[in-house]
Amino acid sequence: METLKGNFKRYIYKSDKGYVIGLFKVKEATGEDLAFYVNHTITFTGYFHELNEEDTYLFYGRLVEHEKYGEQFQVESYERVLPEEKDAIVEFLSSGLFKGIGEKTAEKIVSYLGKDTLSIILENPSDLLLIPGITKKQITNLHHTLEEYEASYQTVLKLSELGFTTKDSLLIYNVYKQNTLSVLDENIYLFMEEIEDISFKKVDTIFLKHGGKRDDLRRIMAAILYVIGEVCNLYGHSYLTLPEIHAFLIRALGNDVAPSELQKAIEQLLLDIKLVLIDDHYYLKKMYEAENNITKRCGYLMRKTDFSDKKMTTYLKEVETHFGCTYNEEQLEAIKKALEKNILIVTGGPGTGKTTIIKAICELYSRIHKISYDHLSKEVVLLAPTGRASKRLSESTLLPALTIHRFLKWNKDGDYFAVNEYNKSDAQLVIIDEFSMVDTYLFDHLLKGLRYDTKLILVGDHHQLPSVGPGQLLKDMIESKMIHTVELKQLYRQSLGSNIITLAYQIKNDQLAMDIFNVQEDLLFDPVLPSKVKEKTVEIASLYKDKLMAFQVLAPMYKTLNGIDQLNASLQEVFNPPAKNKRELLINDVLFREEDKVIQLSNMPDENIFNGDIGTIDEIRVVGSKKEVWIDFDGNKVRYTASNFNKFKHAYAISIHKSQGSEFDVVVLPIVKGYGKMLYRKLIYTAVTRAKKKLYLVGEIDALKMAIQNYDTDIRHTSLKNFLIENINE
């Protein structure tokens, strides 16, 4: 742990939750790397309550290298150092913090009370009556202000002593302020209910450690909320039943709960409107509201009068001429209805031209509304759930496309969207590609950030993997039959005769014809023992040494003999073996090398890099103890330092989940029974549909059959379908 002592200078950024980026003037420092900053200013980050320029602070933390802003001091904890010298106390009292106390009055107080001035004001304020010219009002103000000033620090200290981290303590204090300790006494579990970053496990550990009873009603209530949230996020559900809650509750609490106590807790949560009960289904309030908001918006858009234009057919012919193509009947219907309807779903499997439809819709919109293609992006917004999907969409339409998070201006540090119900977008039409990947909460946030009459076009294939978060929006919307839907079934010419596409449709329909493999060069199956799968994959990879970015291995899981980690280690030797001119760096026992293929694991919007983006290591720099990795993402070179080396992995093999929204010319799909529960229909269907020109399956044919027949993992408990039927039929 390194230490800085000095003064706060100014804020660069401050979030509502207390996250701060600022400048700090260093007076003293411990640590070799920090010596340079004595009598200089350093950028710092961390969680704080209030900082002011008059105080002296001790910051405890470490010097880190930010990928964009350079060296920063990352504060893990801090303390305020009250002034001790007489001059410093005078400066403190006359700083403006204490109303009505100027420099002369401050000097008079300190000359009488000396170095103990501040402790006397706190403990024996009546002693100030002995000072000539000091009024009772001034004494009361001094005492109360200093008490409040100390209380904030003492409250944070109290929380830290209980077992909360400094960050947690400041998050809590910044929400409750002077009421923090009373909330702590009333119900410590409110912290985890009302502050997303405070976990149930942390609060529960502290509660039990300090004498809390295992059968305390507040504990059971908090655990119920925690269980419903965690299980729904994990399995994609919208609600749980009472038996499910009880079963998971026992695991969360580490002890059984009497049915009467469970019922009492449930009833209180319903009374407090923290849970909603509909038809024996228990929802978290925010999930119920999200599904309801989506239902109401869809209902409104469905009832709203359609748009019509007598020249629609003429414009459609102009679009065909413009692009030099002839659309089939399904495509024409989709393009036409996209402009007529206020909400439309366009769905279809691979090869049916969903992206082509989006391109035509944009062109038709510009002609009907007589706006230039350059102006089009101000009215029509193209969105996708992932960075790679948005890039593909932009490349195919030649229009800007954004991730939903970027469009909503997600603030990572504050965890909020700047585009919201109070600051709406002016978009007239929003088209969302790969909509099957969008979860309920994110779509709800998007709708809140759009005007109520903004037209929506939702494009996707609900047979692919659903969203990582709760919900199955596209599936529920289509199956409700309440929203106008155009299904594209006819394959494009380049897809006709493609055995990859045929296999995808067989998987979707729970079929598998063995004579489909090894007939044409686009679909090959190599039956090998599980112990030989990696060896065979490497053999295939060696055929594509010069096509690194076009070739991709997809696997269901990271661990095991044929998992992603093992495959990457072997494939690195094929595509990027050691060489004297290539620098290397060991990160968490994994060896990275210049020219390695890597995948981004989280969003970095400031760098225009998103989860799932694939690039290559352009340069590794090691200077003393400082290490840097520069990664090239299609010409966008991004610097990584030790603080964020965990944001990328090798990408010779990647997970099928990470591949969603992407396409590759050549895909190798290892498939063995050892993948266990990860063998299910939607996962394999998604993997197969990532291949554009060639697909190799390597392993056990029985494993493929198991996956096709297994759709249990696809089952999610959601209500949107029924809500739509009930609402729109009213």
Image (cartoon, rainbow, N blue to C red):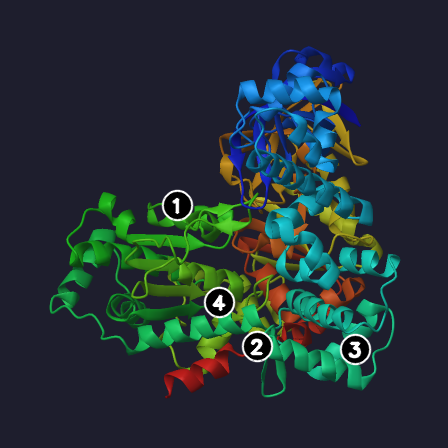
Of residue 577 and residue 198, the one placed in the foreground of this image is: 198
Label annotation for residue 461: 4
For label 3, the residue is: 247
Q: Nearer the viewer, mark 2 or mark 4?
A: 2
Of residue 206 and residue 686, the one placed in the foreground of this image is: 206
Q: Residue at x 80, y 60 (%)?
A: 204
Please tell me how crowded label 4 is: few (under 14), some (14-19), or many (20+) other residues with Cα within 10 Å: many
Residue contact at pointers 3 and 2, CB within 8 angstroms: no
Q: Amino acid at mark 1?
A: Glu
Q: CA distance from mark 3 to mark 1?
A: 49 Å
Q: Is residue 182 visible?
A: yes
Q: Amino acid at mark 3?
A: Ala
458 with respect to 129 (left or right): left
Q: Nearer the viewer, mark 3 or mark 1?
A: 3
Locate residue 212, reporting x and y percent. Answer: 85, 64
Q: CA distance from mark 3 to mark 2?
A: 20 Å
For label 2, the residue is: 718
Q: Residue at x 21, y 54 (%)?
A: 366
Counting residues from the start of the chain, the first of labels 2 and 4 encountered is 4
Q: Amino acid at mark 4?
A: Asp
Q: Secondary structure at mark 4?
A: loop
Locate residue 479, reporting x and y percent. Answer: 47, 80
Quadrant of image for the N terminus? top right
Counting residues from the start of the chain, the first of labels 4 and 1 encountered is 1
Label annotation for residue 395: 1
Q: Quadrant of residue 341?
A: bottom left
Of residue 33 and residue 200, the one placed in the foreground of this image is: 200
Q: Secondary structure at mark 3?
A: helix
Counting residues from the start of the chain, the first of labels 2 and 1 encountered is 1
Label annotation for residue 75: none
Residue contact at pointers 2 and 4, CB within 8 angstroms: no
